[in-house]
Image: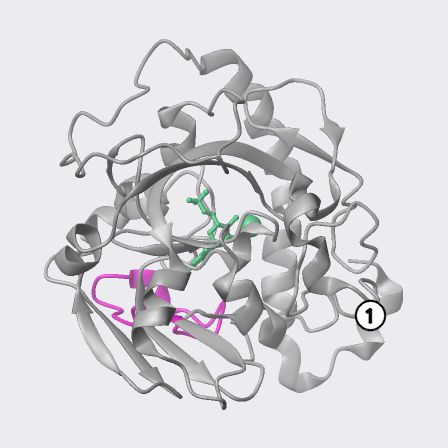
Amino acid sequence: MSNSKLPQIRPSEITDEAVYHSRRRFLATVSAAAATSLLVTDRSVAESAPDLPALPPARPSRFSTKVRPTSYRDITHYNNFYEFATDKYSPATLAASLVTRPWTVAVDGAVKQPRTYGIEELIHQNPLEDRVYRFRCVEGWSMVIPWVGFPLSRLIRQAQPTGNAKYVKFTTLYNPREMPNQRSDILRWPYVEGLRMDEAMHPLTILAVGLYGRVLPNQDGAPVRLVVPWKYGFKSIKSIVRISFVEEQPLTTWMRAVPSEYGFYSNVNPNDDHTPWSQERERRIGDFFKRPTQLFNGYGDQVAQLYRGMDLNKYY
Ligand SMILES: Nc1nc2c(c(=O)[nH]1)N[C@H]1C(S)=C(S)[C@@H](COP(=O)(O)O)O[C@H]1N2
Ligand SMILES: [Mo]
């Protein structure tokens, strides 16, 4: 963070500052990790998840990229999951304390059919699809992840939103006994995210219940998480317990923490100048050289029309 910005920080935002620095420190870690990953990743090893239960068969999707996925090892050992830790490596072990069965997801708010789903219903009553997506974190790293999931639009149609449903608000579990870093005030808990209704209905937007054909490992957001591939990774909220339909734009966790840096839309944009990291280029985990960042993470053909007439620098 540049010192010129310091006077703008109000006393009430001191926690926000701590968060800011903690995210910023990852710059060094990310570079080191990318180099390490290059050395230790053997793509012939551990491309499946032998310890976890398999999911029902999933069908291929035309939305999948043909690019080879990042290794299972890297997807499950390089995580952002602040409910457990703010480093990338310990969620893989610390998230073992999360209990994902039984698990329910409440769907409520401005809908005609509010109801609570058990996780097994979500898995077995929706046709699962393989969705191999590019995944881009705002910190400047990316992966290719073979998610298994179903379109969020399926759940939305079942809920029958009313005319007052303008946004969808997602909430992560709050349980400090199972998510020990919720005892710290590094962020406001529980983690909250949101989408505009048309973004939530978009066919690329999925609820993921697995990866590499098996149930989600805890560190990747078990048992169910959002995946919005054209937005920065922090929009893809993990371990969801509530999906609410609301009239007002939800105040998301990262907007609340550092409003000048993280906006509601958070579409991947190489020209972003408000995030702490330059977004011009990104490092695909496992690669040595950086590559140019693609507008909307390369999904512009499918999503740019959602933002027609909107100034992407204003609505960031
Ligand atoms: N509840 C919750 N969801 C979260 C996060 C988090 O800390 N808590 N981190 C976000 C960020 S910053 C990223 S990049 C992705 C990381 O997902 P992955 O660990 O499966 O790669 O999850 C997002 N969802
Ligand atoms: Mo992220």
Give the residue type that dot 1 points to: Lys
Left or right, residue 125 beside residue 202: left
Numbered-mark total: 1
The image quadrant of residue 122 is bottom left
Q: Which residue is mark 1?
A: 314
The image quadrant of residue 243 is bottom left
Report x, y in % for residue 2: 84, 59
Q: Is residue 305 above or below residue 260?
A: above
Report x, y in % for residue 20: 65, 62
Query: Is residue 313 covered in magenta?
Result: no
Q: For this rendering, which residue is in front, 222 or 30?
A: 222
Q: Evaluate whether residue 198 shows in this view.
A: yes
Q: For this rendering, which residue is in front, 91 or 282?
A: 282
Q: For this rendering, which residue is in front, 162 or 172?
A: 162
Left or right, residue 165 beside residue 260: left
Q: Is residue 165 above or below residue 203?
A: below
Q: Determine the residue positioned at 38% across, 79% down.
A: 244
Q: Residue furthest right?
A: 4
User: Which stretch is magenta?
Assistant: 171-190
Helix, strand, or loop for circle 1?
A: loop
Q: Evaluate whether residue 196 shows in this view.
A: no
Name the magenta segment's main secondary structure: loop
Q: Is residue 223 above or below residue 176?
A: above
- The N terminus: image quadrant: bottom right
Left or right, residue 183 beside residue 270: left
- The C terminus: image quadrant: bottom right
Q: For this rendering, which residue is in front, 19 or 143?
A: 143
The image quadrant of residue 266 is bottom right
Report x, y in % for residue 110: 40, 88
Q: Determine the residue positioned at 81% across, 71% down.
A: 6
Report x, y in % for residue 196: 57, 72
